[in-house]
Each structure stands twice: as structure tokens, then as C-alpha cells.
Image (spheres, grey):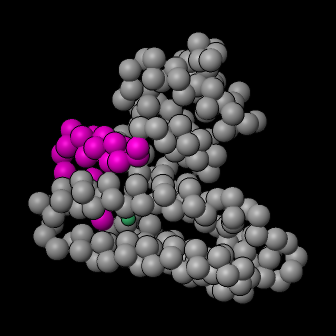
Amino acid sequence: MPVPLDAIRAIHNGFRNDMAAMDKAANSAAHKSGNLDLVLKRYNLFNEVLVWHAVGEEKFVFPAVEKVALLVSQPYERDHRGLDSLFERLDKAISSNDLIEVARTTAAFKFHLDIHLAKEDAHLYRIFDEKVPLPEQGATIGNMAREVPQQRYGEFVTWLMTFTNLNDRENMTRIWQQMLPAPAFAGMGGLIKAAVGDDWAKLTERVPELKSAAKSDSR
Ligand SMILES: [Fe+2]
């Protein structure tokens, strides 16, 4: 059975994969061997999910860590402001259609994001895992999930299922199954099926209840 921290691991992997694909596309566009379509399509939603996640960390995870390890979370908050400024720079570069500046910015964004997430996984969340009791971990991560606006939750589910691997998809499906009332979980079946594509058979082999959820979600 997944633990609450598996949700964080999955979301971090989603950010890594989405950003890696955008940086690759931006690099191709700058070298005139591709275009910016993928970046244009994805960068706003990527940043919205990043902000929901970062705000959730600042409101719930950092205070929980502060209680057991004073001053540890401050540099992570500073990293988040760096991510904010990279998004602003990317948005500006895209508006002015400057392909070189777009590629320079996605490279910097990816580098900073990867270092930040790796540091959180190895340090911040290790402290969280070792020093914060499991029920409080669950409550903290449940509170973070509520930072995603309810009317956008479907987009969030699709985003996460698109940019993660089978293990993360299984963990997230089980976490939603535990967390949500049955009708809400059933409401996600169709979204998950559409997002995971060819992985649907493997995923429903691992979580058979998902199959019936997708069937009853025949709106
Ligand atoms: Fe963070």
C-alpha cells in the first residue's frame, strides 16, 4: 500500500518529465529543427500545478518540518521564488517569440527545478518522513491536495497521469481510492483511462477496482 509521501514523489516526477520534454522542444526550436508548439501548449498548466504544489508545501509541509527541524525550510521557500521568476522570464520570452531566450530559460528552469526537487527528496522530505508521525504526514498531504481548485482537479489528474510512470500511476490511483468517496473515485476512471493510454491494461491489472470505476463513469 502506498504511503502519503508517494504522492509527493509522483508529483515531483511529473514536474521532471514535463519540464524535460519542454526543454527538449525549446532546444530543437532554437536550433531550427522543431517548433515551440509543445511548450506553448503546456507551459501555463505546468506552472499552475507547480504553484499549487509550492503553495501547499509552504502552507502545510514547511510548518510541519519547522516544528521538528528549525530553519530547515527557509532555503526551500527561497528556491520557490526562484521558480516563480523563471516562469515570468519564460512567459516574457514566449510573448516576444525569442526562440534563443526561450531555450536559455527552459534550460535554467530545468536545472533549478531538478536541483530543487532532488534536494527536497533527499533532505526536506527525509526529515518530514523521519520526524513527523505518519498520521500527520497523511493530514499534511491531504491539506496540500486541497490547494488544487476543485473545478481544476480533473486537469490535475490528467496532468499527473500523463507525466508519470506505471509505479507512480498505481500509487496515485490507490491514494485517490483511499482518500475519495466512491462516486468521486468513479468520476476519475474515464480521465485516468484517457491519460494513461496503452498503460491502461497494466494499470487495471494492478488496481482492478479502477476498471469498474471507469465503467460506472459513463457520463
Ligand atoms: Fe518545493
Q: Is residue 14 left or right of residue 83?
A: right
Q: Residue furthest right?
A: 33
Does 110 sit above or below residue 46?
Answer: below
Residue drawn at x 39%, y 26% as measured from the top left: 180
Verify whether residue 44 appears in magenta: no
Q: Nearer the viewer, residue 112 or 204?
A: 112
Instruction: Give residue 118's quadrant in the image.
Output: bottom left
| Residue 31 percent location from the top left of the image | 83, 83
Instruction: Give residue 82's quadrant in the image.
Output: bottom left
Does 146 sit above or below residue 117?
Answer: above
Give the main secondary structure, helix, strand or loop, of the magenta stretch.
helix
Does 65 sit above or below residue 73?
Answer: above
Q: Is residue 219 left or right of residue 67?
A: right
Q: Which residues are magenta?
A: 124-149
Q: Nearer the viewer, residue 143 or 96?
A: 96
Query: Splitting the image into four quadrants, where does ligand 1 fall?
Result: bottom left
| Residue 56 percent location from the top left of the image | 32, 54
Verify whether residue 140 appears in magenta: yes
Q: Nearer the viewer, residue 6 or 62?
A: 62
Q: Residue furthest front?
A: 96
Q: Is residue 35 left or right of residue 137?
A: right
Residue drawn at x 30%, y 72% as measured from the top left: 77
Does 82 sit above or below residue 1?
Answer: below
Residue 174 can be seen in this image: yes
Residue drawn at x 52%, y 44% as measured from the top left: 156
Residue 128 can be seen in this image: no
Instruction: Give residue 177's quadrant in the image.
Output: top left
Q: Quadrant of the N terminus?
A: top left
